[in-house]
Amino acid sequence: MSDHWLARPETIRWLWRAFIALLALTVLAEFFVAHHPHFHVEEVAGFGAWYGFLACAGLILAAKGLAILLKRPDTYYEKGERDG
Amino acid sequence: MASEFVHPGLLVVVAGFALALLRGRARAAVALVAPLAALWLILAAPAGIAWSGSWLGFEVRPLAYDALSRMFALVFAIMAFAGALFALNQKSRLELPAALVYAGSAIGAVLAGDLVTLFVCWELMAVGSTLVIWSAGSGSAYRASLRYMAIHLLGGVLLFAGIAGHVAATGSTGFERMALDSPAQWLILAGFLINAGAPPLSAWLPDAYPEASWSGMVFLSAFTTKTAVYVLLRGFPGTELLVWVGLFMVFYGIVYALLENDMRRILAYSIVNQVGFMVTGIGIGTEMALNGSAAHAFTHIIYKALLLMSAGSVLYATQKRKCTDLGGLFRTMPLTAVCGTIGALAISSFPLTSGFVSKSMISQAAGDERLLWVWLALAAATAGVFLHAGIKFPWFVFFQKDSGLRPDEPPLNMRLAMLLFAALCIGLGIFYQPLYALLPFGASFVPYTGSHVVVQLELLLFSGLAFFVMLPMLRRTLTITLDVDWIYRRLAPALVNACTVALHEIGAALGAARTLSKRHIGAAVHALHGPQALLARTWTTGGMALWVAVLLAAYLVVYYY
């Protein structure tokens, strides 16, 4: 029995292509709209694109860094509280 | 007009008490009609003070309408209706009554024209919400509800001390804008911020809310934190400290949600994140920013409830809450998956959803004020919201791997509640004028300009790219992330245990010392005063006469010199 159409590898490949096309389109669309920048950094080409990507990469790395210190098994609190 | 003498909050509270006695159709009817009646009263009431009087010598105004209080009361009534619709098939006989008391007191808190009424409603909310958590019935929910109550009683004590000091100093119970120039006003601010989920005590929220039942958390997500946003809007607009508190909450929510495995704890962290946006706007304090915070509270209540309804439906259908156990549910729960995804798009402020028309105002205000770092932080956080809630939640619950689970869609009432809120999320995103008409200030804003839409789409879609590129780093594990609640769940009990052990040891040492000293001192006393000892034995008459003679001789010698 074949899986749901949305889960098939060919659909997923197609979705990736559409997604990358969409990414390119949003950056190209910048040239066709009027801008009212508040700051100089907004005038750099594709600001939203590279800033969004870098911000997310930074946040993921920050989370991974914090996890080294603060990660615990999810049964961490259960034991002590049941005994107590 | 009924709207001038019936209090909508009180109406919902009374309906909550009545629900405890009702069953079947009557219960459903009261649960649905009471919030709708409140909604009508809130819309129909004229602006101004409807109820006023004096109580214990204080001037009180329990029912006062203006644009700001009406806007919050309105969304609370909408939320109470949809929440009740979603919870109609909840088996617990405690939860729905408690939830309506909680909702009614939240409406009462935002319609309170004075600090005394506000405080009474504030505490009633704490009781109602604790009961909502309690009614989940599990041991972990009970323990979480006690921790939740402890934090909220602490907040209540701070608020009460602040209000008492404020009333004593000014002689007025009026709830006006405050300048933070006295300890009493700092205490009031601290009480408000605890309910907002601000640092350092943010942990109460992701600790307690996800322990509520599948329907309970839908109610909990709406009222406590947004009442706090309302009182901050009214009491502390333009307080710069709030910008930094808000930005901390924004990033705290994202980072913790990224590490979380429990689907409803992800959404709980994202409540702190979203309230952070509102608190930042309140701190910026311009009319544009305050409008943005108020609008964002309005839209947030709706999309966050929608997200929690879809998570609640999954919990209801599968009894599972961890991302590691879920996945692939879109096959048999397509409606829940679509509604959850609409909520996820709205929280990420995608154009054509409600989040876009509200959150953009806060960023715009930061830009207008030339606050570069705040503006950059808000833009990064906007991308981060899509990362931690917008994609992460629907991806791990409804898509990713096939968990093999094939649950059915939830019952009709739950589906209707989700459809209603999904329609509102998109409706408010397209037809935003009715929402803007409710805003408390006059600042005008046009959400759909070419550059707004394009930059927002860039931020969000490239955030999506980052998610899928870095997906291996986001793989879910069976872990939690420690938070400040570790201090009162682990460190403090450990210190108490250590003190108990130390006291026991000190006690034992003292006991040993007593035994020892009894033996040694007793032996010494016995040596001197015992039956045959030096000081107690019988002396001979001759010996005594000799010593008396010696004493008299010594006296004689001393007398001569």
Image (tube, rainbow, N blue to C red):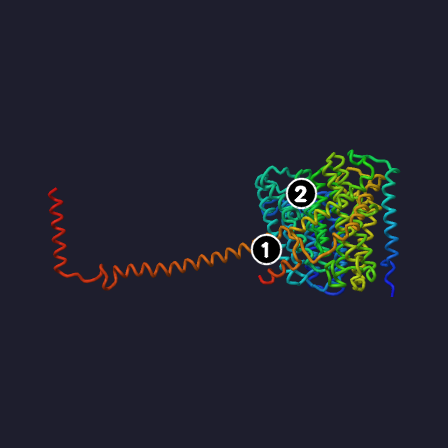
Quarter of the image with the N terminus of chain A is: bottom right
For residue B474, above or below residue B235: below
The chain carrying label 2 is B
> Residue B551 at x, y = what percent?
14, 51
* Mark seen at residue B490: 1
User: Total label count?
Assistant: 2
State left or right for residue B431 relative to residue B234: right
Amino acid of disc 2: Val
Amino acid of disc 1: Arg
Q: CA distance from mark 2 to mark 1?
A: 26 Å
Mark yes or no: residue B158 visible.
yes
The chain carrying label 1 is B
Mark 2 on the same chain as mark 1: yes
In terms of secondary structure, where does tag 1 sit? helix
- Asked where in the image residue B250 lies, by quadrant, the reply is top right
> Residue B281 at x, y = what percent?
72, 41
Which of the two residues, A67 or B180, is positioned nearer the viewer here? A67
In terms of secondary structure, where does tag 2 sit? helix
Which of the two residues, B117 or B327, is positioned nearer the viewer here? B327
Q: Residues within 10 Å of mark 1 (few under 14, many from 20)?
A: some
**Sequence-first disc among 2 and 1:** 2
> Residue B57 at x, y = what percent?
58, 45
Mark yes or no: residue B50 visible.
no
Q: Which residue is mark 2?
A: B245
Q: Residues within 10 Å of mark 2 (few under 14, many from 20)?
A: some
State left or right for residue B517 relative to residue B79: left
- Asked where in the image residue B32 lies, by quadrant, the reply is bottom right
